[in-house]
C-alpha cells in the first residue's frame, strides 16, 4: 500500500512519475487528506507538495506518520515549517533550477510595462493603430534599480540588469559579495536610492506588506516588478500609488490572494499582470519535478536530502 501523497495539480508527466516511482495517491489540497480512508492516511510517510494552499499544523496532524515533505518550488511560505520541525518532518524545496526563468520573467515584465507592450499589442490586434498612435514609453537602459532580496533569483536579476547598464542597489539581511552593487539594510533607503524596484525576497510573515505606501512614495516615478510573493506588496497602497502617483507602472507575476486578483489591479492600465508563470517552462518544470522526486526518494530511503529547507 502507498506511503506517499501527491498533493496539487501536477502536469501529467510529473503525476505519472510520482505514481510509477512512489505509487503516490493524488489529492488536490493538503486539507483533502481528511477525505482519505484512515488506513491510507495513517500510513503516509512522504508528501510531494505542489501549490500554495496552507499546510499548517492541522493538515500535518492528519498525517501522523509523515516524515518527508518535498515541495515543488522554492517558496515554502505556505508550509508551517516550525510545526513540521516540531514533528521531526524534513522539508525540502527545489531551489536554483528555476532561477534563470524567474529572472528572465522579471526582466520581461519590466520591459513590457515600461514600454507599454500590452497597449501596443492591443492597438495592432484591434486595428485601432490606424486611428490612434501608440503612447511613448520610458527608457529602461541606464536606470537605477533596486532588488529586494539578493538570493539566487535576485542575483540572476542583477546579473541581467548589468546588461542594461543599470546602477544596482539591493536589500538583504546581510551584505553580499558583489561586483560593486550597493547594499541597503533598510527598504526605505533602498527605495530612495533607485528608480525601479524588483522584488525577489521570500514570502511569509517577515516580509508581509514590506512594500507599502511609504516605500512607494520614496521610490517615486518608477516601476515595481514582483516575481516573489504577492504578500510582500501592500496591494491597496500600490493601487493608490498607481492611481494618484507617483508609481508609473507595475509588472506582477504574483498576487496576495491568487488565483483571485483584486480587479482594480488585474484591470489597471498601468499594470502588466501574469498568472504566476515565472518558472513555467518545459525545461524548468522538468528539473523541478526531478529534484522534488530526488529529495523524496532520499528521505524515504533514510538518506540526507539534496536541498533541505533550512
Ligand atoms: P533565496 O535564495 O533564499 O533568496 C531570498 C532572499 O531574500 C535572500 O537574499 C534573503 O536575504 C532575502 N530575505 C529573506 N528574508 C528576508 C527578510 N525578512 N527581509 C529582507 N530580505 C530577506 O530564494 P530564491 O531562490 O531567490 O527565491 C526567492 C523567492 O522567490 C522565493 O522565496 C519564492 O517565494 C519566490 N519565487 C517565485 C517564483 C514565481 O514563479 N513567481 C518562482 C520561484 C520563487 P539573505 O540572503 O541575507 O538571507
Image: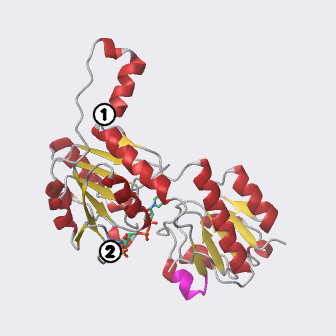
Check the image and report above or below for 305 versus 32: below
Please give left or right for residue 131 compared with residue 84 in the image: left
Q: Nearer the viewer, mark 1 or mark 2?
A: 2
Region of the chain picked out in magenta, as a range = 83-89
Query: Which sits in the foreground, 309 or 203?
Result: 309
Q: Quadrant of the N terminus?
A: bottom right
Residue where numbered disc 1 is placed: 116
- Residue 157 quadrant: bottom left
Corner quadrant of residue 65: bottom right
Considering only order in the chain, which callout, 2 or 1, is on the residue closer to the N terminus?
A: 1
- In the picture, the disc for residue 289 is none
Displayed-image quarter of ligand 1: bottom left
Residue 79 appears at what percent x and percent y?
Answer: 52, 72
Q: Between 192 and 83, which is closer to the camera in this rendering?
A: 192
Q: Secondary structure beneath disc 1?
A: loop
Q: Residue at x 28, y 68 (%)?
A: 171
**Residue 271 in sight from this viewpoint:** no
Q: Which mark is residue 176?
A: 2
Residue appearing at x 75%, y 81% in the figure = 301
> At which x and y percent is residue 51?
56, 59
Verify whether residue 86 appears in magenta: yes
- Residue contact at pointers 1 and 2, CB within 8 angstroms: no
Amino acid at each position: 500500500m502507498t506511503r506517499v501523497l501527491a498533493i496539487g495539480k501536477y502536469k501529467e508527466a510529473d503525476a505519472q512519475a510520482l505514481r510509477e516511482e512512489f505509487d503516490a495517491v493524488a489529492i488536490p489540497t493538503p486539507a483533502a487528506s481528511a477525505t482519505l480512508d484512515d488506513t491510507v492516511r495513517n500510513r503516509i510517510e512522504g508528501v510531494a507538495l505542489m501549490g500554495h494552499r496552507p499546510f499548517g499544523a492541522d493538515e500535518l496532524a492528519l498525517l501522523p506518520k509523515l516524515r518527508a515533505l518535498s515541495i515543488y518550488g522554492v517558496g515554502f511560505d505556505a508550509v508551517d515549517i516550525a510545526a513540521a520541525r516540531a514533528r521531526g518532518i524534513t522539508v525540502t524545496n527545489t531551489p536554483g533550477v528555476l532561477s534563470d526563468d524567474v529572472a528572465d520573467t522579471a526582466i520581461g515584465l519590466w520591459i513590457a510595462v515600461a514600454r507599454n507592450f500590452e497597449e501596443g499589442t492591443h492597438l495592432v490586434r484591434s486595428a485601432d493603430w490606424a486611428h490612434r498612435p501608440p503612447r511613448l514609453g520610458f527608457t529602461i537602459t541606464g536606470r537605477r534599480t533596486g532588488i529586494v532580496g539578493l538570493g539566487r533569483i535576485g542575483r540572476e536579476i542583477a546579473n541581467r540588469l548589468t546588461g542594461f547598464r543599470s546602477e544596482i542597489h539591493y536589500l538583504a539581511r546581510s551584505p553580499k559579495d558583489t561586483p560593486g552593487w550597493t547594499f541597503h539594510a533598510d527598504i526605505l533607503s533602498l527605495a530612495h536610492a533607485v528608480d525601479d524596484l524588483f522584488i525577489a525576497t521570500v514570502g511569509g510573515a517577515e516580509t508581509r506588506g514590506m512594500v507599502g505606501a511609504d516605500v512607494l512614495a520614496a521610490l517615486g516615478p518608477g516601476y515595481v516588478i514582483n516575481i516573489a510573493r504577492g504578500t510582500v506588496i501592500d496591494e491597496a497602497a500600490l493601487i493608490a500609488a498607481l492611481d494618484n502617483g507617483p508609481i508609473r507602472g507595475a509588472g506582477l507575476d504574483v498576487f496576495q490572494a491568487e488565483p483571485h486578483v483584486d480587479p482594480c489591479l488585474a484591470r489597471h492600465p498601468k499594470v502588466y499582470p501574469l498568472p504566476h508563470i515565472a518558472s513555467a517552462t518545459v525545461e524548468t518544470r522538468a528539473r523541478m519535478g526531478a529534484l522534488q522526486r530526488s529529495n523524496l526518494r532520499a528521505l524515504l530511503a533514510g538518506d540526507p536530502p539534496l536541498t533541505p529547507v533550512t
